[in-house]
Amino acid sequence: MSNDKVDETKEEVVKEFSADQTREELVEKFNIEDNEDNTELLDSLVADKQAEHKKFSTAITQKISWRTKAQEAEEKVEKKPKAPSAQAISEEELLKKVDARFEERDLKSNGLSDELTEKVKSYAKVNEVSVKEAINSDYIKFEVKGEEDKAKAEEASLGGKSKAGTKKGYSLDEVPKFDMRTKEGKEDFKNWEEWLKKQ
């Protein structure tokens, strides 16, 4: 709604009330004679109508005012160019993030030790290849084999945890305590049960 139309509407609402015209309408509507005896009654009725009209015109004026302010605010919003979102990222950056997530997944799914994981990351970065390609490279395969051989050698040695646990001496007088939360504890318990069956 333009400002000219708003001004016209305000004027119409304000001009609409006329005491003389309202007096004539009341005389006609309630069949009251317009004389000195009814002057006080008619004046009171006209004053009531005028108060009602004032409240009504105030409400209309406020409504028009608020509508105008809302339209002005909308126009200001429409005129402002929308700034690009701070969260917007380029397609290239998005692809890099997705690739990084996949590489992280590949690293975790291979079950490599922390040391080997770091070697894989370094190898991939230096040679500019993916993590998957780095894992399948001869160098990393050699490192994995070396780590496996080292673990087997430790297990086979006299100080190996699982082998040393089976050579325990058990007694019928005392029930040993086993830590069932660990693999070694469960194996010890199994060995003790087998020893007990043989007794």
Image (cartoon, rainbow, N blue to C red):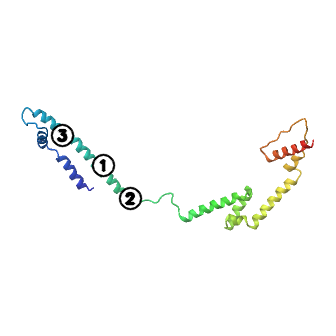
The answer to whether mark 2 and mark 3 are in CB contact below 8 A is no
Under circle 3, the secondary element is: helix
Give amino acid for label 2: Lys
The answer to whether mark 1 and mark 3 are in CB contact below 8 A is no
The quadrant in which residue 93 appears is bottom right
Q: Is residue 130 above or below residue 61?
A: below
Q: Nearer the viewer, residue 182 or 83?
A: 182
Q: Is residue 122 left or right of residue 34?
A: right
Residue name at image x 23 percent, y 41 percent? 55
**Tag 2 residue:** 80
Q: Which mark is residue 66?
A: 1
Q: Nearer the viewer, residue 126 or 29?
A: 29
The quadrant in which residue 36 appears is top left
The quadrant in which residue 111 appears is bottom right
Q: Is residue 7 left or right of residue 76?
A: left
In three-dimensional space, the C-alpha distance between marks 1 and 3, rounded to whole angstroms, equals 24 Å
* Residue 18 in picture, x, y percent from top left: 14, 44
In three-dimensional space, the C-alpha distance between marks 1 and 2, rounded to whole angstroms, equals 21 Å
Q: Quadrant of the N terminus?
A: bottom left
**Tag 3 residue:** 50
